[in-house]
């Protein structure tokens, strides 16, 4: 069995409310085991015998769309990948102390031109670092002081994204994935 973490976009935002118990039940109906959710923002841990995360993401998206009536982009990471994401440090400790670090999950690594376009958006408030199929986004003041939203990242990269605070990622790793 393979353990995955699904990061779902647009869950419990914009008037689209989904109970975590219902989300768990849906994942079980889709044939997944050991299903657990973490907080209300669409983080689902599960196991599957299927080693193909792309196929799994497509199945989850189809199930969510059929059940909820709207598209829910789904970003899967293995436990090894999520531990790596949590441990990766693209910014100095001094820089991190100045603000809050977020990770935007992407469906694939952006092409070089897309990466350069995103990095060119950096300001005194916002810094970006791309690591594989994630964007590390440091807000030096506050989320509200940023000139950008997740939609701006999506438009610049030409792909969907969902964002989580690095503290959420650390808590998932500590609670569910620590050895």
Image (cartoon, helix red, strand yellow):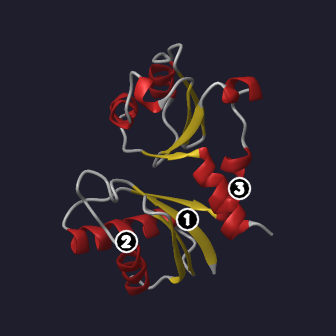
Answer whether labels 3 and 1 touch (C-beta < 8 Å). no
Closer to the camera: disc 1 or disc 2?
A: 1
In the picture as drawn, the residue positioned furthest to the left comes out as 69
Q: Residues within 10 Å of mark 2 (few under 14, many from 20)?
A: some
Number of residue marks: 3
Q: Position of residue 74 (x, y in %)?
A: 41, 59
| Separation of residues labelled 1 and 2 (CA atoms) | 14 Å
User: Mark 1 or mark 2, which has the lower sequence index?
Assistant: 1
| Separation of residues labelled 3 and 2 (CA atoms) | 24 Å
User: Which of 62/96 is in front?
Assistant: 96
Residue at the spot of label 1: 5
- Name which residue lies at 51% across and 47% down: 164
Answer whether labels 3 and 2 touch (C-beta < 8 Å). no
- Name which residue lies at 65% across and 58% down: 171
Relative to residue 48, is residue 122 depicted above or below? above
- Name which residue lies at 52% across and 26% down: 112
Q: Position of residue 144 (x, y in %)?
A: 41, 29
User: Mark 3 or mark 1, which has the lower sequence index?
Assistant: 1
In the picture as drawn, the residue positioned furthest to the top comes out as 124
- Name which residue lies at 39% across and 21% down: 147
Residue at the spot of label 3: 83
Mark number displayed over residue 59: 2
| Separation of residues labelled 3 and 1 (CA atoms) | 11 Å
Q: Residues within 10 Å of mark 1 (few under 14, many from 20)?
A: many
Relative side of 45 to 65, left or right: right
Q: Position of residue 168 (x, y in %)?
A: 58, 53
- Confirm whether residue 144 shows in the render: yes
**Which part of the image, by quadrant, shows the C terminus?**
bottom right
Q: Residues within 10 Å of mark 3 (few under 14, many from 20)?
A: some
Closer to the camera: disc 3 or disc 2?
A: 3
**Helix or strand or loop: what does disc 3 sit on?**
helix
């Amino acid at each position: 069995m393979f353990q995955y973490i699904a990061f779902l976009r647009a869950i419990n935002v914009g008037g689209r409310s989904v109970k975590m118990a219902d989300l768990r039940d849906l994942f079980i109906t889709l044939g997944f085991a050991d299903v657990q959710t973490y907080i209300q923002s669409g983080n689902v841990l599960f196991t599957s015998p299927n080693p193909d995360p792309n196929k799994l993401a497509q199945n989850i998206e189809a199930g969510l769309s059929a059940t909820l009536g709207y598209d829910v982009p789904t970003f899967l990471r293995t436990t090894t990948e999520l531990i790596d994401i949590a441990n990766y440090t693209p910014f100095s400790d001094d820089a991190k102390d100045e603000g809050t670090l977020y990770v935007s999950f992407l469906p694939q690594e952006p092409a070089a031109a897309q990466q350069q376009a995103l990095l060119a958006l950096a300001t005194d408030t916002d810094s970006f670092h791309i690591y594989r199929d994630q964007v590390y986004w440091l807000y030096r003041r506050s989320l509200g002081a940023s000139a950008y939203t997740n939609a701006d990242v999506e438009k610049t990269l030409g792909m969907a994204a969902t964002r989580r605070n690095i503290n959420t990622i650390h808590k998932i790793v500590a609670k569910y994935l620590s050895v």
